[in-house]
Image (cartoon, rainbow, N blue to C red):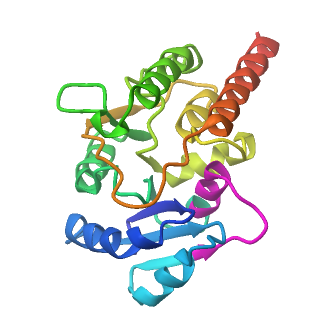
Amino acid sequence: MTELCVVLPTFNEADNVAPLAGALDRALAGLDWEAILVDDDSPDGTAARIEALQHPRIRCLLRKGRRGLASAAIEGFLASRAPFVALMDADLQHDEAQLPAMLSLAKSDRLDLVVGTRYTAGGSAAGLGGRGRTWLSQAGAQASRSLTGGTKLSDPMSGFFLARRELIAELAPRLSQRGYKILLDLVASAGRPLRVGEVAYRFRPRQAGQSKLGLKVGAEFLLLLASKWWKRGRST
């Protein structure tokens, strides 16, 4: 039985598909894994490039008429029967080599969630590039910590994490389908402290394509924060 499913939302990542497949093969050798690349009908032919791999462990979930990282991640998680699911970017900025350690930690300590963090010893956010992206990441992390409650995270803005699929299935009806910061949404929607571990990693420069971070992403993040703060205020 497949033990780990790695979900990678994609949009215009055609040139990263083959290097990504090779990186996952090397990092996950010896594990029973699969990867689901959830493609939002990329005009650059990302889906066709995935299918051309004919990789026995990698499949494409093609979405037509809808777009967004959060909804793509949720659909990918729920499309697998693996007991553990992980989220990564397809641009090779996250360190796939940390996935075995994240899985081992989740199993040995019976954790709900293991987060790849840039902000503890051994981690680095250098790959963000530019003061604007770095400032946005740090400011967003600071603003979001009030929503994590008893769940302590050094990097609540991380897009690299591993979770038990049963947790995702439980929380899916409460999660926003919009935005990019699904980790924060998961923790804020749980309604209880989660058992969380962290693994440090170095955030690498993007290999190909263009970053999706922009004004729209920032606005959607602010809307997510406002929505969670409002719901929390109503429940108190």
- The spot of residue 149 in percent (x, y) is 55, 16
The outermost residue toward the left is: 122
**With respect to residue 69, does 220 lie above or below?**
above
Q: What residue sits 30% from the left and 26% below the top?
A: 119
Residue 2 visible: no
Query: On the picture, is 133 further left or further right than 42?
Result: left
Q: Is residue 62 magenta?
A: yes
**In this image, 14 relative to 102: left or right?**
right
In magenta, the rendered stretch is: 61-76
Looking at the image, which is closer to me, 142 or 77? 142
Q: Is residue 126 visible?
A: yes
The residue closer to the viewer here, 167 or 100, is 100
> Residue 80, located in which quarter of the rendered image?
bottom right
- The quadrant of the rendering that contains the C terminus is top right
Of 229 and 48, the residue lying toward us: 48
The answer to which quarter of the image holds residue 108 is top left
> In the image, what residue occupies the spot 39% across and 79% down?
57
Q: Relative to residue 161, is residue 54 depicted above or below?
A: below
Residue 161 falls inside the magenta stretch: no
- In the rendered image, residue 2, in percent from the top left (x then y), is placed at 40, 72
- Residue 155 in the image, given as x and y percentages of width and height: 40, 28
Image: 109 above or below 76: above
Front-lying residue, 84 or 11: 11
Q: Where is residue 50 shown, x and y percent of the image?
A: 47, 80
